[in-house]
Amino acid sequence: MFKPLFRICCAGALSSVIAFCPAVAADNDADTIKVGVMHSLSGTMAISESTLSQTVQMLIDEQNQKGGLLGKKLEAVVVDPASDWPVFAEKTRQILAQDKVAVIFGCWTSVSRKAVLPVVEELDGLLFYPVQYEGEESSRNIIYTGAAPNQQAIPAVDYLLNDLGVERFVLAGTDYVFPRTANKIIEAYLKAHGVAADDIMINYTPFGHSDWQSIVSQIKDFGSTGKKTAVISTLNGDANVPFYRELANQNVQATDIPVMAFSVGEEELSGIDTAPLVGHMAAWNYFESIETPENTDFIQKWHEYTKNPDRVTNDPMEATYIGFNLWVKAVEKAQSTDVDDVLENIVGVETPNLTGGTAKVLPNHHITKPVYIGEIQDDGQFQVVWESEGEVAGDAWSDYLPGSADLEADWTDPINCGNYNTKTKKCLGATAQSAAAH
């Protein structure tokens, strides 16, 4: 039975990292396969990302107990980008060029992913990205196991419009690429469905924002016109804790102005009193409360690994679990950890998710996922109030943004492009392109 091997390198300048971790430049040993684990263990995003770092290490440990992969042990190369977006790029270059990792599991925010993207493309690395995001991207070197907008944001908006009869919308987000792009899509979608511009309020705050008194007051005022009002929250990281606390302080209840969150799950709620938040919602592709044999087994293994029966699970953990298993299957299919070999074999690979369905890698490097909307309960868990009919295929390019509706991603021959224009029959670029570029 193999034991997991870990090397943890601190954040900082690359030269200082090498000095602190003298073994980091070593090549892969003949009997090991190095796996990059790149999630923030400090800084504003640690509240969310540190759990994902542990999740990958747990999966590596479990795979090693099964005998490893291709007859070799897996070795985790763990780095802490410390919620600093340029450091994500620096760490990516380090673990690809020096540590020679075969794959990277990492990033949470889109700004960190976009910092990493050109590096993995340049060095032909492979990143599995496990968090819901704004779409408008498809890279040959990234497998997106989190939700695209059509697998989270659009179904959530439809639920608010059709099931709850919401007429006014507050789009509250952290000031970076995911909330801004997601809100552009949501705003266009709302207007296309008859919501007036005056009935949409948009607000952005910096990472780690803590003073929510005036903003929550503005939300209350906006919702006091007699029209049913809801908040769509794309707040990320530890800013969620004071936001929800201020909602409770000002007695903003779900029956009055419900909040639909895209980046708040069981982990973020575990640190606050959720009793005043009962009925507020989140849209995800997994909740810990979903009862399946696969989920029960995963939760048990997580409690055993962390030696803490109170540790919760969440959606990005499931996406990490899915991504890890997809990579293992693709490696076994290719009989190689070479990135080109893995990518040639990964499209069409399937693995069970934790909610009783199947995740399949699509030609656009997104996957199939179910969609769930859950209401917060007083124990910090979510009760599912709506779910999609089966899995939804992730769409890399939004149908609701100008310049995107005609684009599709397909990394198989003969298209082999992340931004293929279906009208002009031309690829707009050999690598991923963001909506901002078009």
Image (cartoon, rainbow, N blue to C red):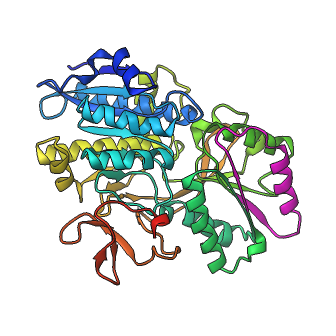
Q: Is residue 152 above or below residue 290?
A: below
Q: Is residue 427 above or below residue 60?
A: below
Q: Is residue 337 left or right of residue 227?
A: left
Q: Where are the magenta residues, as a range? A: 202-231
The N terminus lies in which quarter of the figure?
top left
Q: Is residue 16 above or below residue 237?
A: above
Which residue: 46% across, 70% down?
438
Q: Where does residue 81 sit, x and y in percent of width and height?
A: 46, 32
266 or 149: nearer the eye?
Answer: 149
Q: Is residue 432 above or below residue 22?
A: below
**Is residue 353 visible to the viewer in this orientation of the structure?**
no
165 or 23: nearer the eye?
Answer: 23
Q: Is residue 203 magenta?
A: yes
Q: Is residue 44 left or right of residue 21?
A: right
Q: Is residue 222 magenta?
A: yes
- Residue 166: image quadrant is bottom right
Which residue: 57% across, 30% down?
43
Which residue: 26% across, 18% down?
3
Q: Where does residue 226 sit, x and y in percent of width and height?
A: 88, 69
333 or 356: nearer the eye?
Answer: 333
Q: How many marks?
A: 0
Q: Where does residue 328 sit, x and y in percent of width and height?
A: 23, 41
Q: Is residue 119 left or right of residue 209?
A: left
Which residue: 56% across, 61% down?
181
**Is residue 248 visible to the viewer in this orientation of the structure?**
yes
Q: Is residue 205 left or right of residue 349?
A: right
Q: Residue at the far front: name it.
A: 15
Q: Where does residue 12 sit, x and y in percent of width and height?
A: 46, 25
